[in-house]
Amino acid sequence: MDKQDAKALIDRAREELKGAKRVLIGAGAGLNYGGERFRRHMHAFIERYGMTDMYSAGFYPFADDADRWAYWAHHATVNNLGQPVLPLYEELYAWAKDRDCFVITTNADGQFLKAGFSPDRLFTPQGDYAHIQCANGYDVREIFASIKEDTGHGERTRISDPSLIPMCPTCGGPMAMHLRVDGDFVQDDDWYAAQRRYFEFAQGIADHPTVLLIIRRPGSAGPSSGWPR
């Protein structure tokens, strides 16, 4: 495709977005899990484990829960709980807030909520870093804040106080991140309610003109700024 054809497609997309009254946003590939950002935030874990990026590190076979939860408390803080909203999502919300809008995203970083999107118009089928699970999803903010204090905010890679290791308040058993990595992913009543709202919105496409907008991580191929007002 030459530059002239590419410009024509961009101009057409801009016009479609300006006139959109109803939009379904699909988003994947959120924050950058490798490169300089990974090295800056995860240097202690890189030194101890030889990790190469934050995605593959999520599958690391930690020796025990003291190591595992030290990592996940830091990972969740870096990629969700302690990560401010990015300009891309603020721009997207400014464009979408006055439109009939729904978001489905595989991102676990909470960026859409931070930008202002309503949780009733958001479906995260793969989970997020703000919750852990056993029989249900539990908010981790206070739990991970305590772990971060114990591990020096990522300077140490192991929990020294065993009482900080998360255990299920319902059954007393071990917990896991609320992320879809296997067949044990918890789909509770809130998950199914969000799924129903997404299905209902998607079914409305048959009767109401709807723009389907795919969002990619800034720096990847595709537009990342300059949303039409």
Image (spheres, rainbow, N blue to C red):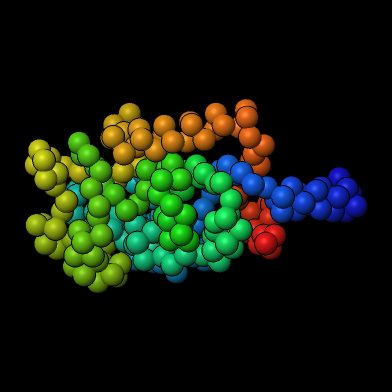
Q: Could you tell me residue 197's position as x and y percent?
A: 44, 36
- Vertical placement of residue 12 versus 85, above or below: above
Between 16 and 33, the one nearer to me in the picture: 16
* Image quadrant in which the C terminus is located: bottom right
Between 144 and 47, the one nearer to me in the picture: 144
Q: Could you tell me residue 219's position as x and y percent?
A: 63, 59
* Image quadrant in which the N terminus is located: top right
* Residue at 77% from the left image edge and 51% from the top image edge: 15
Between 30 and 26, the one nearer to me in the picture: 26
* Residue at 37% from the left image edge and 43% from the top image edge: 127
Between 177 and 200, the one nearer to me in the picture: 200
Q: Can residue 175 be seen from the camera position used here?
A: yes
Q: Could you tell me residue 28's position as x and y percent?
A: 53, 46
- Vertical placement of residue 148 versus 119, above or below: below
* Residue at 31% from the left image edge and 43% from the top image edge: 178
* Residue at 48% from the left image edge and 61% from the top image edge: 115
- Vertical placement of residue 210 versus 76, above or below: above
The quarter of the displayed image where residue 203 is located: top right
Q: Could you tell me residue 202's position as x and y percent?
A: 54, 33
Report how many numbered discs are placed on residues in the image.
Answer: 0
Q: Can residue 185 be seen from the camera position used here?
A: no
In the rendered structure, the answer to whether residue 70 lies left or right of residue 95 reads left
